[in-house]
Amino acid sequence: MPDNSEFFPLTQLATRFVDQLTHCRRLGLKVHEASEHHVLIELPYNEALIGYPDTGVIHGGVITTLMDTASGSAVVCSIYDKYQSLELSPTLDLRVDYMKPAQPNQPVFGFAECYKLSSSVAFTRAIAYQESIDDPIAHAVGSFMRISPELIGKEFQQALMGNQHG
């Protein structure tokens, strides 16, 4: 995947957000790019994530986690871009439709976009794929609660913002 430096500030924010989540670090999730509208995250293939030993196929729950994380990251980036503030945005609802299993020994990519921000809810759509976004493994729609920036702990805020803000 190419490094798109035009997306660097939000890519850095999305990376820090994902890196704060222990389960995402354990899965090896890597943010490739982020903008005010989308996030692209890679889930590397790992034998520890196999749900079906006979086939080597990654467990569907891991794909759901990828979609949820990509969607949540897209919400964080969208809110930050629009309001210049950080908000916690827990998942209210995530519907995932699986179309086919992921191919063994290949990474899976999660592309998510936040397409609507209301005063209390953010709405997302996402696609999990391997070789082409036009041949999806799964797609998802989600809604995320918007929680006031004042409720974010200083330590978490500093972890996300790095040296940009004190």
Image (cartoon, rainbow, N blue to C red):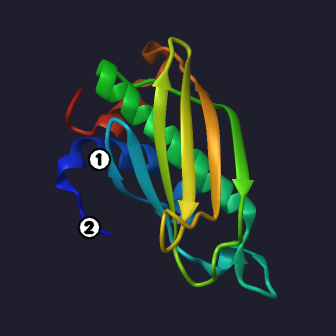
Residue positioned most to the bottom: 54
Kindly identify the amino acid type of the residue bearing the numbered disc 2.
Answer: Pro
Label 1 – label 2 distance at C-alpha: 15 Å
* Marks 1 and 2 close (CB-CB < 8 Å): no
Q: In the figure, is residue 11 to the left or right of 117? A: left
Q: Is residue 20 visible?
A: no
Q: Residue at x 37, y 38 (%)?
A: 37
Measured from the top left, where is residue 82 in percent x and y?
Answer: 32, 22
Q: Which residue is mark 2?
A: 2
Residue 151's place in the image compared with 142, above or below, is above
Q: In the figure, is residue 99 to the left or right of 118? A: right
Say what secondary structure mark 1 lies in: helix
Residue 47's place in the image compared with 164, above or below, is below
Q: In the figure, is residue 53 to the left or right of 162? A: right
Q: Residues within 10 Å of mark 1 (few under 14, many from 20)?
A: some
Tally the numbered discs: 2
Between 71 and 151, the residue placed more toward the observer is 71
Q: Is residue 64 visible?
A: yes
From the image, which quarter does the C terminus lie in?
top left
Corner quadrant of residue 165: top left
Q: Earlier in the sequence, mark 1 or mark 2?
A: 2
Q: Residues within 10 Å of mark 2 (few under 14, many from 20)?
A: few
Measured from the top left, where is residue 13 in percent x and y?
Answer: 33, 41
Q: Residue at x 37, y 35 (%)?
A: 77
Measured from the top left, where is residue 156 in percent x and y?
Answer: 43, 33
Residue 107's place in the image compared with 159, above or below, is below
Kindly identify the amino acid type of the residue bearing the numbered disc 1.
Answer: Gln
Q: Which residue is mark 1?
A: 12
Say what secondary structure mark 2 lies in: loop
Measured from the top left, where is residue 68 in percent x and y?
Answer: 60, 46
Q: In the figure, is residue 119 to the left or right of 99? A: left
Residue positioned most to the front: 134
